[in-house]
Each structure stands twice: as C-alpha cells, then as structure tokens.
Image: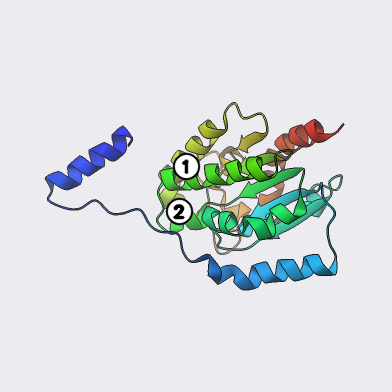
Amino acid sequence: MTTRALLAVVMWSALGLQAPAPRPSPDPARFEADIAAFEAEDRAAPPSPGATLFVGSSSIRYWDVARAFPALRTIRRGYGGSHVSDTLHFFDRIVLPYRPSLVVFYAGDADVSGGKDAATIAADTAALVRRIHAQLPAAAVLVIGTKPSPLHWPHIATIRDANRRVRDGLAGDGLAAFVDVEAALVGADGQPRPDFYTENRLNLNARGYEAWTAAVRPAIERLTSRRTP
C-alpha cells in the first residue's frame, strides 16, 4: 500500500468511516455486439499477420489510422466507452488472432469517469502488456497515456497519476513504450484546447487528431523500425 493510500485509510478510520472500495470493472458483455462485428469483418476479409494493431476505446475508434500511417499495414479495433479491463477480457478475440508486430493501445477515459483510481488503471494496463508479451512475444507495445479532455479535466490528478504509474512500469521494457499526449493537447494556459475536441468535450476532432498523431508518430516509427529486418 502506498503512503498516500495508507494515510487515506487512517483518515477514514479516524472519522469512524469505512474507506470506499475500489470501483469494480463493468460487465464486458455490454460490448459483445461490437466484438462479434469485428469477428464478422475478419471472416469476410481475414487479415494477414504482422500488421500494426490499434486497439482500445473511442479515441482509437475515430482515429483514421490508415490515413495517418499510410506506410503501415493497420488494423483498427476501437470500441467506444471501453475500459482497459475490457480489452483484457476480449484479448483472445481482438488482439491475439491478428498476430500483430506492434500493438498500439489507448484507454482510460471511461476508467476515470467510472471512478477507478490510478493504481487500478495502471495495474490493468500492466496486466495487458504482460499478456501481450506472454502470448505475442515478438510484438512491440505502445501505450498512449490517457488524454486531458475538457470533460474529464476534473479528474486530471488521477489521469496524471495513472499515466506516471504506467510510464514508470514500462521503463526498461525493451519491447514497450509509453507516450504522454498531454503537452500536445493543452494550450498556453495549461488547459485542454477546446478547438481540439468535438461538442461532447471528450472526443478529438480533426485538428485534435493531427496534434495527437504528431505526438504519437515518433514512438510508432521507433518501434516499427525495430521490427524491420
């Protein structure tokens, strides 16, 4: 238990209250139709192994990765509102079958809005990376840190803590990397740039994706160059 967590427990005990339990992950069955649709697409046009797989939540779903990375053979498997735990649950159906050379993963928005703490988000992400390493030992992994959206700005302390934990956990991992996109998406005032987001204040618009892609591209190029004979 961290010092911060221990102090929180002591404070709650002193007040005669029980510390709140960590939020459980929602039932992944809510995405069964989305996953089945991916599988139907794969049956109609089976992808060959070795592609770059982009997987995760709505930021992946709406990212035109084929246009952003024309030199790569890409597969996009984004399903909006998903937690890190959902991709872990569906790993055998939306990651493993593609035998990708690189997995680019993004999630965290729904985790934060669902009340999960930074330790839980980081632990779930670490479990996903371990699973990729164990079952796809030749694949590289890029984790994109949770973005600073206007909608979730009240949770920025949790977002930054989770991102730090994930980054630190990947340090020294020769087959994995972490990209923090916060600096690319905030303005001179240190706030999320509203002109980078759609009306829902969560999803990126075209300008936001340009900034996001520019921040992520160097890491993808480094990782893909390692995989090139």
Q: Which x, y percent locates residue 63? A: 71, 55
Dividing the picture into quarters, in which one does residue 31 lie? bottom right
Residue under label 1: 162
Badge 2 or badge 1: first in the primary sequence: 2
Q: Which x, y percent locates residue 132? A: 64, 44
**Which one is nearer the viewer's eye here, 56 or 172?**
172
Number of residue marks: 2
Q: Which x, y percent locates residue 18? A: 20, 53
Dot 1: within a 10 Å radius of its alpha carbon, few (fewer than 14), some, or many (20 or more) residues?
many
In the rendered structure, find residue 112 and report the number of the disc placed on it. Answer: 2
Amino acid on which disc 2 is placed = Val
Q: Secondary structure at mark 2?
A: helix
Quadrant placement of the N terminus: top left
Please say if the residues under marks 2 and 1 sit with CB atoms less than 8 Å apart: yes
Amino acid on which disc 1 is placed = Ala
Residue furthest top as drawn? 172
The residue at 64%/41% (across/down) is: 134
Dividing the picture into quarters, in which one does residue 21 lie? bottom left
